[in-house]
Amino acid sequence: MESESDIKTTPRGFHCVLCKVNVPNQSSVDQHVKGRKHQTLSNVRTTRKTQEQHSVFVSGIKPDISQADLVEYFQKFGTVSDIILDKDRGVFAIVQFSETDSIQAALSCIEHRMKGLNLRVKPREKKEFAYIPKKKCDLQNLQQVLDRLKPQLCQLPSVNAQMQYIESRFQLGDAEKKARNLLVQLLQEIFVEFFPDSQILQFGSSVNTFGIHSCDLDLFLDLENTKVFQARAKYTSEAAECMSDDGRSEDSILSDIDLSTASPVEILELVATILRRCVPSVHKVHMVSSARLPVVKFHHRELNLQGDITVNNKLAVRNTRFLQLCSGIDHRLRPLVFTIRYWAKQKQLAACQIQSEVLFVLKLKGNPSGPGPLLNNYALTLLVIFFLQNCEPPVIPTVDRLKDMACEEEECLIEGWNCTFPSQPIAVPPSGNTQDLCTLLAGFFSFYAKFDFASSVISLRAGRVLPITDFLCNKDNYNKDKDQEKNTKPQQSGPKLGPLNILDPFELSHNVAGNLNERSQKCFQKACQDAEKYCRSLQYLRKSTKGKMWGLVRLFTPDGGVEQTTPDELNISIPFKSFALPEALRNQLHVAGDDFRSLWFEKVCTCVQKVFQSVLRCELTLSAGFGVSEDLAADVSVEMETSSGSLNTSANDSLNSPTNAAQVGAKRRLSASDETSLSPQGKKARMSKRGKRELPYWLWVQKHSVWAGRRKVRREIIKDADLQPEGSCMDLETRVTDRIIEKEEELKEPLEFKVQPHVVGGTENTRTVLKLEPCSDRAGVLQDFVHFLDAFLPKMVESLLEKEAGGS
């Protein structure tokens, strides 16, 4: 098998020559070969080989030779499935046959004459398939682009002017818009020949007022009228005669497919064929059928423009109209969005692409290399709009408020979702918010620096966060708007939950940030925290009189997105990951409602104790404060109350209170750290109202360095027995510990330490924080032990939660 030949043995494990990655052991090899990346590349390689085996190389043609001419000539040797023309110089082509016998017939022909030309036909060159990963933006390229902006930005008088300059510098120009419109008109003229009464509609960045240089051209091929046309043609002999007498190509195209029953993939295959054969300067046409919404991608050579065509994306067109409306409601939205997108790209939080002088492409449907862990520009725009909805007073109304402002003629229902809002911005009363761009930008960072992403679902429809517990149970009744009850379409499944959850304004079952992983979300929040801190400084607010960097320049300086940690911290964080919880536990948390944190905290504490005691063989000398769930739940609720109050209150205070530390230019209060301020110990006044009770804690003793050499021991055990890899088997990790204890000597001085767990949430992501303190550490090994636990403990807790839920 080819998959076996792809794996080569190396001194350190194995190497996949197809994917160009190293894997440590045989278990990992088995998982890798079954993985999405390897399977995708393997399928692409198979397709390429099949194409090579069915193709011949033809030279000696001229630019005026069309694909139809080549098809007509080579059809006599066998069925031609595809023609690939060299459109740059027009001197060669690749002819692909359906059968291999056709290749031999074409090659055995001594002379090929077509339209006065002597064609040379030879076998297609066989090339070894090689995966070439796309280059990612590096810090040097990011800095180079910023260096070109620096002189202009530093000379401007204010941050407001800098933000307006960013908007004008990167926005889609009038000439670019005109060129795109001409291409759309050409596509409309061509497609209407094959699909009568069809429409090509633009959506996305090109027309939603947030387009930037070289952004993709997103197109929707609306075939509703064509389906009506085809239905009439079937039952009306007059229409059928008109089709045949007309002699146009829609007769053949519509006779080959029934649009009312054809799948989007089948229709898009026809679309791809039309693009290849009929549209000048279009090449690199390929279909992505595995996407959430299948799409045909193409590249227009003369405009150097990437394009996408879908046939089932009406909601995206409506989303575009919504963004156009929001842009017209308040003039501050566009410069704010352009600035935050550029900041996200510079911090490597969003996808980027080098294009001339502009390094600023944030694609609507993901990053250039596929659905990776980066923010897309649509998600970023919705984050900005949601923040503006929560300002005091609001800058942008909620979607529900906009729906109430629409008249009866503007009512819109698409695929069962209520997409009603006014068609013109004049129908929306102006906002009473008078904050300038500088203050709003600082407010955005302050808002999300303290945001509880883990326990919240962002809803632009309601203009507030929805509790994650509403989405944990397998019920679908939250998906549909009450106005849609008359629709008979089956209920949709819930959104895909992740570390960051942003509901689409209309398609409420779609999380537009569902591709993000936990690390991406943490990097985004950490970047917001750093930006919030910078926006308090005078370097942000005041122009430098000495020509130094100030304002947006320092904010945009790339830092690689590396999270900074304090080396002296002895804390271990176990995040609340709703999307990773087993179904049984999700249902329990759903029933618990607002008290879900205390229930989850108790279960985590139970798992932590099992890991220390049963897996790592620590000796428990004292356990205090556990076992009284009522008191524990009360402590959790007090901590949540002191840490945040309500989200909207804290957000509005941070944006508008003149005495709040988040105000632009204000100095940070010299108090405890943010982490400490969330702990009950930091709220003694509030705690004293109900009587002070120390948080629960354990006292442990560890006599062996069970963290040293675990990887080597684990490999030995896996080699001897058929066990699963790290993080998925409690029995395996227990055996690793037992073998280390059996082989290694005890520590000269046992490590005695205290572990104090507490739950953090409300203004930070919900998580359990374990604070470790040494009681006796003469050997100085606690730091190493904590470093090991930081990665090991969360994985084991996640595994135990799943195991216990399965056994309940």
Image: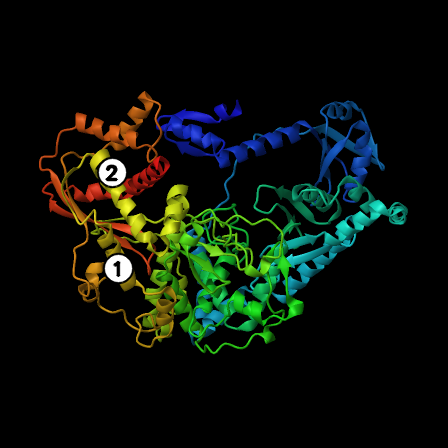
Element type at marker 1?
helix
What is the x, y in percent for residue 277? 74, 44
In the figure, 61 relative to 716: above or below? below
Residue 611's tag is 2
- Residue 522 visible to the viewer: yes
Closest to the observer, 73 or 216: 216
Which of the marked residues, 1 or 2, is nearer the chain's N terminus? 2
Residue 62's tag is none
Residue neighbourhood size for the residue with mark 2, other residues' Cα within 10 Å, grouped as few (<14), some (14–19), many (≥20): many
Q: Position of 196 compared to 753: left or right? A: right
At x 26% / y 58%, what residue is drawn? 675
Q: Position of 3 compared to 499: left or right? A: right
What is the x, y in percent for residue 96? 71, 32
At x 79% / y 36%, what residue is drawn? 71
Question: Which quadrant of the rendered structure holds the C terminus?
Answer: top left
In the figure, 115 relative to 196: above or below? above
Q: Position of 114 compared to 586: left or right? A: right
Element type at marker 2?
helix
Q: Are marks 1 and 2 in contact (CB under 8 Å)?
A: no
Please give the residue where the numbered disc 1 appears in the rendered image. 639
At x 67% / y 42%, what residue is drawn? 263
Q: Nearer the viewer, mark 1 or mark 2?
A: 1
Quadrant in the rendering for residue 124: top right
In the figure, 515 relative to 652: above or below? above
What is the x, y in percent for residue 79? 77, 30
- Residue 561 visible to the viewer: no
In the figure, 294 relative to 438: above or below? above
Quadrant in the rendering for residue 114: top right
Three-letter residue code for mark 2: Val
Instruction: Work out how far the residue at label 1 is from the one at label 2, CA to CA, in angstroms.
Output: 26 Å
